[in-house]
Image: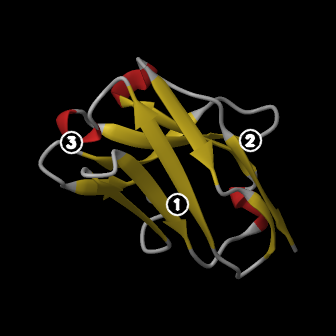
């Protein structure tokens, strides 16, 4: 299984980014897929989930700003990040639920 995240970068506060996750070895439509993030010195935390039937949920800190989605035909998962704040700075990972499968992350840096 490979989950390759991309799309990170440096953005000013208030800006937007779209992260992508290319999956191989599993079908994203058959799993609960999550985006998790890890800031320096802090534990990894999941911030967005999409279930096998397409239902989505978010932690309070990103609700209304981040949107998780998927394209089953392309076997891709996405995370749209809007209205970014410096506290969103972290490495973002695409994972299955509980991190059973997790790939290399992509760094998001938000400047104030």
Instruction: Give the alpha-carbon distance from disc 1 to disc 2, as whole Å.
Output: 14 Å
Badge 1 is on which residue? 61
Residue at 66%, 37% (x, y): give it.
105
The spot of residue 83 in percent (x, y) is 62, 79
Name the N-terminal-most of marks 1 and 3: 3
Q: Is residue 59 visible?
A: no
Q: Is residue 86 left or right of residue 35?
A: right
Q: Given this view, does label 2 or label 3 mark the residue nearer the observer? A: 3
Label 3 neighbour load within 10 Å: few <14, some 14-19, many 20+: some
The answer for how far apart the CA atoms under marks 1 and 3 are is: 26 Å
Give percent across and percent down for residue 74. 33, 51
Q: Dot 2, crowdedness within 10 Å: few (<14), some or many (≥20)? A: some
Q: Residue drawn 31% across and 27% down?
A: 26
Classify mark 3: helix, strand or loop.
Answer: helix
Q: 55 or 4: which is nearer to us?
A: 4
Where, by quadrant of the figure, is residue 41 drawn? top right
Callout 1 touching callout 2 (CB < 8 Å): no
Tell which residue pokes out farthest to the front in this image.
74
Q: Which residue is mark 2?
A: 39
| Image quarter of the C terminus | bottom right
Relative to 74, does residue 27 appear above or below in the rendering?
above
Residue shown at 70% from the left, 80% from the top: 15
Compared across the picture, whether 63 is left or right of 26 comes to right
Q: Which residue is mark 3?
A: 29
Q: Is 46 placed above or below 72 here?
A: above
Q: Residue furthest left?
A: 53
Asked whether the residues under the numbered discs 2 and 3 touch, taking CB atoms below 8 Å apart as contact, a structural biologist would say no
Q: Position of residue 93 (x, y in %)?
A: 58, 38
Sequence-wise first label, 1 or 2: 2
Quadrant into which the N terminus falls: top left
């Amino acid at each position: 299984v490979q989950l390759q995240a991309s799309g990170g970068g440096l953005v000013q506060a208030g800006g937007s980014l779209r992260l992508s996750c290319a999956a191989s070895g599993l079908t994203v439509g058959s799993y609960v897929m999550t985006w998790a993030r890890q800031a320096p010195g802090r534990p990894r935390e999941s911030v967005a989930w999409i279930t096998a039937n397409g239902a989505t949920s978010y932690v309070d800190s990103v609700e209304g700003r981040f949107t998780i989605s998927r394209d089953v035909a392309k076997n891709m998962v996405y995370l749209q990040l809007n209205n970014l704040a410096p506290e969103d700075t972290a490495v973002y990972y695409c994972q299955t639920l509980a991190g059973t499968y997790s790939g290399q992350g992509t760094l998001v840096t938000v400047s104030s």
